[in-house]
Amino acid sequence: MPSAAEDVRRQARRTIRRPAVRGRKLVLFGASLLAAQVKHELEQHGLTLDAVIDNDPDKVGRSYQGLTVQRPETVLVPHRDDCVVIVVAVTATREMLFQMESLGYARDRQAFVLSPTKFDESPAAFLRGVRDVLRGRASYRKLIGRDRESTLFVAPYAGTGDIYLICLYLKSFVERENIRSYKLAVASNACAQVARMMGETDVTAVDWATLNRIIGYGRVVRAAPHEIVVLNDGWDGAPTQWLRGFKGLDFEKMFRHAVFDFPDATAAQIPAPSATNDAVVELFDQQGLVPGRTVVLSPYANTLFHVPDHDFWGAVAARCAARGLTVCTNCAPTEEPIAGTVAARFPLALAADFVETAGYFVGVRSGFCDIVSATGSRMVILYDRDGRFYKGSFQEYFSLDAMGLGRNLLELEYGPGDEDNLVGEVLGGLT
């Protein structure tokens, strides 16, 4: 099953081939992470946006992908025959379409919807829903096995940072609720690795569609307390998601309060990284890296509007090497290391120990940063200044320092054109 980003990109490609779109100015409705995927897809096909609009007053007037976010009425009133509005929506599709039609932009003529959520109220859709509930029941029973008294925890989002935060409080939750036995179902093999690293033993990686069907089954049958527990603060349109970033409700607080209902005084169970892990020491020897004198670069992330380019990372790597440090790039098998650095590819279970052994870390904010946040290494974390996550900026919502997870770190915001000055700030943060 394609991800939401892949789905809207596919829809964007199909939309721009329509005759009604050709030759018109393009207005993007929705300044979101998902909409950024659409913008990138348009640019790959030689198209540029004329404007970005959004109803959220927190976004209006801010920079988004090189454009200033405006109110819909500012751009679309009076009615413009030369414009096409591309609506990118997840939960408010009907409302956004009604707004466009009230301004004279009819659906499929001047307003085109791109959404990973499909609305279908036909009898066939109802029957598919029944089928999905039955399939969810079968999947639940397969995962839970013969122990019908066991709790199934479902972590439906594939973010490794999410599963890291979940595991900081899961054992305390199990103890408080007197749960005798439990199993954990996660959305990817990477999440399963992180959960095992955090001490969870009964973990199964399950595809997103199956997890969603299990959640749906639990809702339909009104599963008993602690039978099926969803470990997410706002899954499938739950209203709590709109509190994210509001008055200091950051990433960690949303999990602690909205998922586990723990007070601020509850201590997270943070694992202690080791700089003497034999497997990590062997990796350092094999790759010619010097323990305590190595900089780990982490330039890749899936949830940022824009990432500093390779020239920036190359400049950081060269400046670090000039200081006598060895430099490596944390990269997946499909990702290329930054020029002049060693490709560091290791299981997520070794990530914290690897960074602890290295001594230095520079990365864009991603789930990987959560995983290695407990290290004593000097860390520089980069946040996209244009990014907004619900009611807060990326740094306000995901700050490791604010969450109490970072020990020895510098957090910096950046935007387009900041790369030259940013290099110096990063190097200063490593001293």
Image: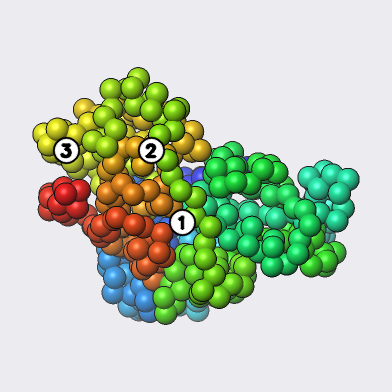
At label 3, counting other C-alpha atoms closer than 10 Å, the crowd grade (few under 14, some 14-19, many 20 or more) is: some
Residue at image position (28%, 74%) is: 61
Task: Tell whether 165 sits left or right of 176.
Answer: left
- Front residue of 258/356: it is 356
At label 1, counting other C-alpha atoms closer than 10 Å, the crowd grade (few under 14, some 14-19, many 20 or more) is: many
The image's mark for residue 34 is 1
Q: Nearer the viewer, mark 3 or mark 1?
A: 3
State the separation of the CA atoms marked 2 and 1: 39 Å
The residue type indicated by label 1 comes to: Leu
State the separation of the CA atoms marked 3 and 2: 21 Å
The residue type indicated by label 3 comes to: Cys
Task: Tell whether 306 sits left or right of 228.
Answer: left
The answer to whether one can see residue 41 in this image is: no
Residue at image position (37%, 48%) is: 375
* Figure check: 280 above or below 163: above
Q: Does label 3 or label 1 sit earlier along the sequence?
A: 1
CB contact under 8 Å: marks 3 and 1: no
Q: Position of residue 403 (x, y in %)?
A: 41, 65
The answer to whether one can see residue 379 in this image is: yes
Q: Does label 3 or label 2 sit earlier along the sequence?
A: 2
Residue beneath disc 3: 320
The residue type indicated by label 2 comes to: Ala
| SS state under label 1 | helix
State the separation of the CA atoms marked 3 and 1: 35 Å
- Front residue of 15/190: it is 190
Q: Position of residue 421 (x, y in %)?
A: 12, 53
Q: Position of residue 195 (x, y in %)?
A: 58, 46
Residue at image position (29%, 33%) is: 291
Q: Does label 2 or label 1 sit earlier along the sequence?
A: 1
Residue beneath disc 2: 275
- Front residue of 131/399: it is 399
